[in-house]
Image (cartoon, rainbow, N blue to C red):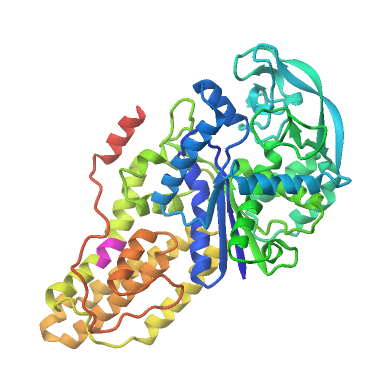
């Protein structure tokens, strides 16, 4: 089966923070798991280089959008690589392959009866001498009264347009905008309500927040949305008479899933419809945070439906809730954030991954605290998993000359591990990553109890066969725990499996007796008790 996994595209206007990672990490776990069970995976994402966030940052810096987006794109690539994200294709919306695909897609889309022209009143800033796209406007949300941008209210999640924003001002100069006429292309999203509602009602594998948000948008009534905008930075509108205008960012960035996977398919000599055709033997996952839900359950399906080529609609929506920091909402403007570029230089990547997945905002908002990060690392990774590995392998090294003892597998262990592979695999495939990790950790705790019950130190001289049995079975447990952890903790799992001459898979693995092991080494170093306080001081707490 072909598996598309689309990770949300971060705006290339600022550094990544822990909230981005919490929302995106499930995609890498899914990709690694599906590869391990033999599926053909297309794990794609990229940097969102167009749109007003990038233009605003460029204006603030006195540089160009190309320079700003290019700089952050490179930073994103370094961060994702350091954390083990195994993208098959990580691109950017300003790349030629995306520009060509989006342009061709829109040229076809404009032939649809669901696309029409309309002259509208659009905000224009006389001081900046430019039309203002939605994110260039700030004001008050008409739904909840909170401060909002012209495209979306972060406080209540309402998708807005510039005309609905109360008391709008220019985000660049703070001046009051004027309203001037401009002709644009619109998508009649309101006419797609029956198909989008059917997609929702027939959904399998959408998280509850995705279902609830989508139902709310549909019940409130869909608004037709502009496909084009008066912008300087973006993809040209492929239609005569629209020179100088760009494709609206919301109508092209979500096409990155198609453009990047199309590039992959072309490289491999495969047909686009083998992954994207309505009848393809494929499964599509979309992984993102809560604020991106409408773009994946409403906007992307609306574009695919209107384009008219019977392309595959989303199968599974893996949408996280929000991650707060020390009890407060992450705020990049107030520098209340943990920046990934700093985090990766100070901590083991698997420690970061483990905490974000084991304590992440999978079903409800979660809070990142440094005290809990340190406790989780020391308790689970060092005290349970790492301790079991080190105590076993150090014993084998000291008393068995680093040779895995000769003994036999026992039916109870094979059955227990086979069932665990099934349970963990099912949980991962359904996006229940916290549950999957919990199952593996419980097996690691059980492995420690087994070692304690066997008491190999007491059997070493009086019952050498019993000691061999214990150590042999513990080595098998180590190998299979590393194998099960591999989608979550790829760095440490690869380190453990390499010791046994194994590679990650999704099947019971067996280490032969007599294998000589390299010297034992600690898998994770304990974090000292002052770590949390030092990090809180960096935050200014």
Q: Percent from the top left, x then y, of residue 512?
A: 29, 83
Total numbered circles: 0
Q: Percent from the top left, x then y, of residue 500?
A: 29, 74
Q: Is residue 6 visible?
A: yes
Left or right for 477, reference 250: left
| Above or below, 336 relative to 532 | above
| Above or below, 116 relative to 28 | above
State yes or no: residue 210 in magenta.
Answer: no
| Above or below, 64 relative to 424 | above
**Rendered residue at 75%/37% (across/down):** 237
Q: Is residue 146 visible?
A: no
Q: Which image quadrant for residue 386?
A: bottom left
| SS assignment for the magenta stretch, majority | helix
Find the magenta span and give its range.
385-389
Q: Percent from the top left, x then y, of residue 162?
A: 73, 26
Q: Quadrant of the N terminus?
A: bottom right
């Amino acid at each position: 089966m072909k598996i598309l996994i689309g990770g949300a595209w971060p705006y290339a206007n600022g550094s990544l923070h822990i909230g981005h990672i919490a929302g995106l990490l499930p995609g890498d776990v899914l990709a690694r798991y599906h590869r391990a069970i033999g599926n053909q995976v297309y794990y794609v994402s990229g940097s969102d280089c167009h749109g007003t966030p990038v233009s605003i940052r460029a204006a603030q810096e006195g540089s160009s959008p190309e320079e700003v987006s290019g700089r952050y794109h490179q930073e994103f690539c370094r961060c994702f690589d350091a954390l083990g994200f195994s993208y098959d294709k990580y691109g950017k919306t300003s790349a030629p392959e995306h520009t060509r695909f989006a342009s061709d897609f829109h040229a076809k889309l404009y032939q649809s009866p669901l696309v029409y022209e309309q002259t509208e009143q659009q905000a224009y800033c006389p001081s900046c001498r430019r039309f203002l796209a939605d994110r260039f406007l700030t004001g008050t949300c008409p739904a909840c009264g909170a401060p909002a941008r012209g495209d979306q209210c972060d406080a209540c999640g309402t998708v807005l347009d510039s005309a609905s924003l109360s008391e709008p001002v220019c985000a660049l100069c703070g001046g009051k905008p004027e309203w001037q006429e401009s002709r644009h292309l619109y998508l009649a999203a309101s006419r797609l309500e029956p198909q989008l509602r059917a997609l929702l009602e027939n959904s399998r594998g959408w998280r509850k927040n995705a279902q609830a948000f989508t139902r709310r948008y549909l019940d409130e009534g869909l608004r037709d949305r502009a496909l084009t905008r008066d912008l300087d930075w973006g993809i040209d509108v492929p239609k005569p008479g629209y020179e100088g205008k760009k494709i609206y960012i919301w109508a092209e960035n979500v096409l990155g899933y198609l453009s990047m996977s199309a590039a992959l398919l072309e490289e491999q000599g495969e047909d686009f419809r083998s992954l994207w055709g309505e009848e393809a033997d494929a499964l599509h996952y979309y992984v993102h945070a809560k604020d991106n839900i409408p773009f994946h359950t409403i906007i992307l399906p609306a574009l695919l439906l209107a384009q008219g080529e019977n392309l595959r609609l989303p199968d599974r929506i893996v949408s996280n809730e929000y991650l707060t920091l020390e009890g407060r909402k992450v705020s990049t403007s107030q520098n209340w954030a943990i920046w990934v570029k700093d985090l990766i230089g100070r901590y083991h990547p698997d420690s970061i991954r483990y905490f974000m997945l084991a304590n992440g905002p999978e079903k409800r908002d979660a809070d990142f605290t440094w005290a809990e990060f340190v406790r989780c690392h020391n308790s689970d990774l060092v005290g349970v998993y790492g301790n079991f590995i080190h105590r076993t392998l150090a014993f084998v090294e000291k008393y068995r000359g680093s040779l895995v003892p000769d003994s036999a597998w026992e039916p109870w262990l094979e059955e227990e591990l086979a069932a665990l592979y099934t349970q963990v695999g099912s949980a991962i495939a359904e996006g229940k990553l916290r549950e999957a990790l919990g199952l593996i950790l419980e097996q690691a705790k059980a492995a420690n109890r087994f070692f304690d019950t066997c008491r190999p130190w007491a059997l070493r001289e009086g019952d050498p066969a019993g000691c061999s049995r214990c150590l042999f079975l513990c080595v098998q447990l180590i190998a299979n725990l590393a194998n099960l952890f591999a989608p979550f903790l790829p760095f440490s799992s690869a380190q453990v499996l390499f010791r046994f001459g194994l590679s990650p898979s999704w099947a019971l693995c067996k280490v032969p007796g007599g294998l000589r092991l390299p010297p034992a080494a600690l898998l994770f170093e304990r974090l000292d008790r002052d770590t949390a306080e030092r990090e809180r001081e960096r935050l200014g707490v």
